[in-house]
Amino acid sequence: MSKTVPRIYRRHLRSRSEPLLESRHRLTWRGFFVGSFLSFFLAIGAPYSNMVIKGAYVSADISTPGAIFVFVVLIGLLNLAFKAAARSKGAALAFAAALGAAWLSAYRPPGDVDVHSPGFIFSTFALICAFANVPLAWSGRSLALNRADLIMVYAMLAMVSAVCTMGLTELILPSLTAVFYYASPENQWREKLFPHFPERNILVDDGAGNALFFEGLSRPGQSIPYGAWVEPLAWWAVFLLALYVCMISIAVILRRQWMERERLSYPIAQAGLAMIRGEDERGLVNGFFKRPSVWMGMAIPLVAGSIRAMSNYNSSIPMVLMRLPIPYASGKVDFALTGFAYLIDTRISGSLWVFYLLGRMQKSLLATAGIKSEQVLEGVYDAPLVGYEGLGALLVLVAVVLWTARDHLKAVWLKAWGRAPHVDDRDEILSYRGAVTGALGGIAVMTAWLWIMGTPLWVSFFFVVLAMAIFIGITRIIAEAGLATLRTPVNAPDFVILGLGSSLVGPTGVFNLSMAYIWANQAVRCFAMATCTNALKLIEEMDSRSRRLVFAALILALLIGTLGSFWMIFHVAYRYGGVNLDIWFFNLGPAKIYDHAVRNLEPAGVYWPGMGFLFGGGGIMALLYLARQRLPWWPLHPIGFPIAAVDLMYHTITSVFIAWLIKVIVLRYGGVNLYRRTQGVFLGMIAGQMLTMGLWLIIDYFTGKTNNWVFAWV
């Protein structure tokens, strides 16, 4: 009897190796034009939404709600309008005239227009596009984007989300100024920290305690003291450029191993992929919006979220409580997290909640036995020792990931130095030589920067390498487990200062590493390596010639995202006063940095209890991987162990459990066919939650309503 591969499976294998895009779908100038503006709009809109409107955080974590919302508007409204207007000369002209009339009626008289307003900026962009579409339509073309353009735009929006609020800008600007404004005899910042400032000027002092930044300009015509910002931001620009180039380079180096060899699922990228695959130049409406299952899923968060939003306008409307009475968890139901979790393997999602329950049990046992720590760790507040255990497991995860990729990494290294001509890197956004140079160069620049600022050289190097290892570990969990709200159990500054001991670091080193909270603590909730890795999943659908342009687009997005959000934060802080904006970014967050530095200035040695739990966690993680490799019946995936005790899991585990339970039932009684049909519902839940958040931010913008949290942020 002959043995052959079934025809249907052969077609599946061919489709995996063939790019989705046809040869005519190349990147165009339209993609760069639209992508650059939408990146700028997200960069200014995200901080405006949580600082002025005080609404939902749209770029607080890896799910990038703001990016998905803007992308939904692009494919569902803008691209449709571009295509419809280009179908005839009259339609293009009428569309431009209608938008022009609406714009003039909305922004007259000109003297009353706030040019910083996101509404004004977006409507002006729409007007420019409408008039630009007229001559294009007359020549048989349009501004409509093809699939390659959409991939690049989505990648740019995701990268902007990594820097425009939680990831960087709303943390760094208040943190560089707060030490002078909030210094008081009670917190002792002036007495204990000022003598240990670096010799280089990396903090902002306008000579008046930065009162204008936190309280606003006091009289008309008063100018913003830009001069005080130039030198500090120039120093930080060097470090941050090295950081982001290093992150992107590492993502490029690992891309082929994770995507083509290990075939990770990338749940967070699936929503964007579904929208992009639905685009068809021959039709007006994107195919994503033609699926009834998608609309069923979108309706759930749209209805629930809108009722919650309206209840904030009218107290007679009952508030929809999205919580379930689940023990040992907050019971919070997040539609987007549930949608992402539905797309991952049930063995992974099941392992996540099993390890979470084991982590809760361990915390209870340690508390009962009186085993506790006086240290304060950002990732695991209630059981710092368990945090060290999680970090040990995370580092072993990174070691396993790198060991598994050893053949690929060797090939990358040899290709980088011209010793492996058979290795083809033309399908990467950056050559392997450029990626290796970017990774090593970034680590070298960051190490030198910290050393110049007064941190011991070996501490600087160890700290940077540790931080990159933590970023790789969290990125791997995100790519494989699809958790969009996640933090490391112990961040790099805490481990070096508290774990290894401040005696090894020195007072100035303690201050410098405490300032690293800006990019290595809360920023881990939304960082460039993870967003870049998800974006690289999208470029699998592009032809190799277009991919090299994506690297330039990502760097451009980072620049636009940083500068645009800086511009907006400067405007609203000096206009309204930072203390009247977001209390976390302008008060509590910076206070944590400087209180952490003051608390740890006293010399201390290695924290041996923490080291014991660190090595114990690493040993358990190694055994879990060994069991997974050697025991076919072993049910648990080790990826859930490092993050089992992280505080944020208390709020996310309910959504993971719901997705796991539904998927198990669907696969058990309906099989793979039913699972594929139900995927649209959960993709719709993801898009629907982001759409609801964005729509109500727009409504609140026009009505002046503030503090209208549609979906609670944790």
Image (tube, rainbow, N blue to C red):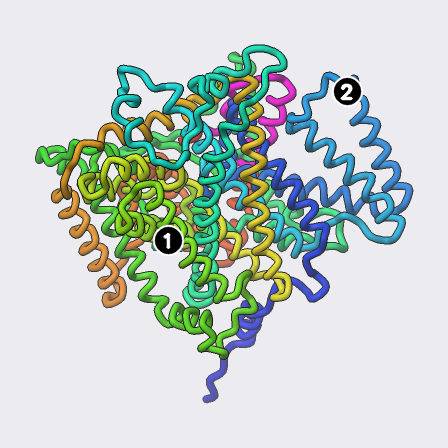
Q: Is residue 101 above or below residue 610?
A: above
Classify residue 595 by image quadrant: top left
Q: Nearer the viewer, residue 74 or 124?
A: 124
**Residues tagged 1 and 2 counted as in contact (Cβ below 8 A):** no
The answer to whether residue 657 is visible is: no
Helix, strand or loop at mark 2: helix
Residue 110 disc label: 2
Residue 539 at what x, y percent from top left? 57, 58
User: Residue, x 68% and y 25% (percent of image)?
Assistant: 115
Q: Is residue 206 above or below residue 268?
A: above
Q: Which residues are magenta?
A: 689-712
Identified by mark 2, the residue type is Pro
Q: Quadrant of the C terminus?
A: top left
Q: Which residue, as the protein is rendered here, is positioned at the far left?
A: 369
Q: Nearer the viewer, residue 464 or 641?
A: 464
Magenta region includes residue 413: no
Relative to 278, is 246 on the left or the right? left
In terms of secondary structure, what is the magenta stretch mainly? helix
Residue 472 disc label: 1
Residue 538 at what x, y percent from top left? 55, 56
Classify residue 385 by image quadrant: top left
Magenta region includes residue 711: yes
Identified by mark 1, the residue type is Ile
User: Residue, x 74% and y 32% (percent of image)?
Assistant: 124
Which of disc 2 and disc 1 is earlier in sequence?
A: 2
Q: Quadrant of the N terminus?
A: bottom left
